[in-house]
Amino acid sequence: MSSETSLQESTSDDRRFLHFTMKITDRLATKKFFCNILGMKILRHEEMDSGCSARCNGDFDSPWSKTMAGYGNENSFFALELNYNYDVQGYEYGNDFSSVTIYNRQAVSNARQYLDKKFIEIDNKQSITIHSPDGHRFILIDEDVQPGDDPVRCLSLNVSNLKTSIDYYTRLLKMKINENESNDNHIKLYYGLKTTQQSKVKTKSGFLVDNQCQLELIEVKHSIDRGTGYGRKAFSCPKNDVELIENVIEKEGHDILIPAMELGGFLGFNKEKIVILSDPDGHEICFVGEENYFKGCEADPDAEKKFYKGLENKPDDPNKYLIGEDKSTKQQDKQ
């Protein structure tokens, strides 16, 4: 797959749905949920002294940590980016996020056996719907995927106008529609390839593109309130596409939260080229150039040690703000 094609010529087969960010308030409880119940692993952990220039942790200038959790390396498996802001005690969660769907029989068994009943929403023979410590909904299906496939099958978000959202994601961002799993009330979108065989098609940089996690958009017919605990979805693409995507979105008059920029450069890796968009309902979207991101997204064998070390670094601040994401919560205003 060529990384030199223009956006108009691209079939989008060289893009991958990487991860979704979640703001959390209790790292240890969240870690136990993702690892002990869902069966994921801590892939990477980083501690930051100040807010991210790309607002990965939200609109905060305070110290924060990032923990990546998933069933395998992010070049082949979908991940959840768990962001913890040290100066924020809690968030207002809106109606933007719906659920994450996972096919994993062991996770279903773990939830039924070990999860506190207050976190269980629905339990039937085929599936169980549960909530994380911060209230994020997970639908666990009592089936396993084929060996080597990703158990995370779908991220579901709510939208106010399905027709408008379909136009944005398919015409402008070149996502494809899974006609077999869509109707008038919701639609499932994907990048890459949908196959019934055990193929392993990869981009030039090495990202797996077949049978990726899907993005489901569900129409709720009223305005979307993202609250202060909103997330952000991230996709990889050839780095040459980053500015092309930005140009298309700008030409159509849609919001660009952060114009194309370079981010990172840690541990000797080259900086990653990114652009941050906002869809018609305000859902945030990050596109990152795959060439350099591939080098930095491999699982760190010391990730769990770094996670526990991070718990010791900065004790809970009794003066944390109860609800975050306004001017009063920024570190510069607390000093």
Image (tube, rainbow, N blue to C red):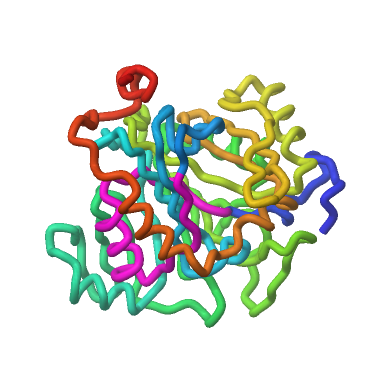
Please give the count of numbered marks on the rendered protein. Answer: 0
**Quarter of the figure that contains the N terminus:** bottom right
The location of residue 262, given as percent across then percent down, is 68, 35
Q: Nearer the viewer, residue 10 or 117?
A: 117
Position in image of residue 93 (x %, y %): 29, 37
The residue furthest front is 313
x and y percent of residue 296 in the render?
63, 55
Which residue is at 36% across, 44% downward? 84
Q: Quadrant of residue 144?
A: bottom left
Residue shown at 46% from the left, 55% from the top: 45
Q: Nearer the viewer, residue 136 or 84?
A: 84
Instruction: Decide whether residue 310 is among the magenta residues.
Output: no
Whether residue 5 sits left or right of residue 87 in the image: it is right
**Residue drawn at point x = 37 percent, y = 23 percent:** 330
Picture quarter containing residue 277?
A: top right
Seen from the viewer's position, the closer of residues 63 and 55 is 63
What residue is rendered at 66% in x and 65% in y? 208
Quadrant the C terminus occupies: top left
Viewed as shown, does residue 295 lie left or right of 256?
A: right
Residue 21 covered by magenta stretch: yes
Q: Position of residue 251 (x, y in %)?
A: 71, 22
Please say whether residue 246 is visible from this viewpoint: yes
Specify the segment rendered in magenta: 18-47
Q: Is residue 184 visible?
A: no
User: Residue 278's quadrant in the figure?
Assistant: top right
Vertical side of 54 occupied by 217: above or below: below
Q: Residue furthest left?
A: 117
Question: Which of 57/252 is in front?
Answer: 57
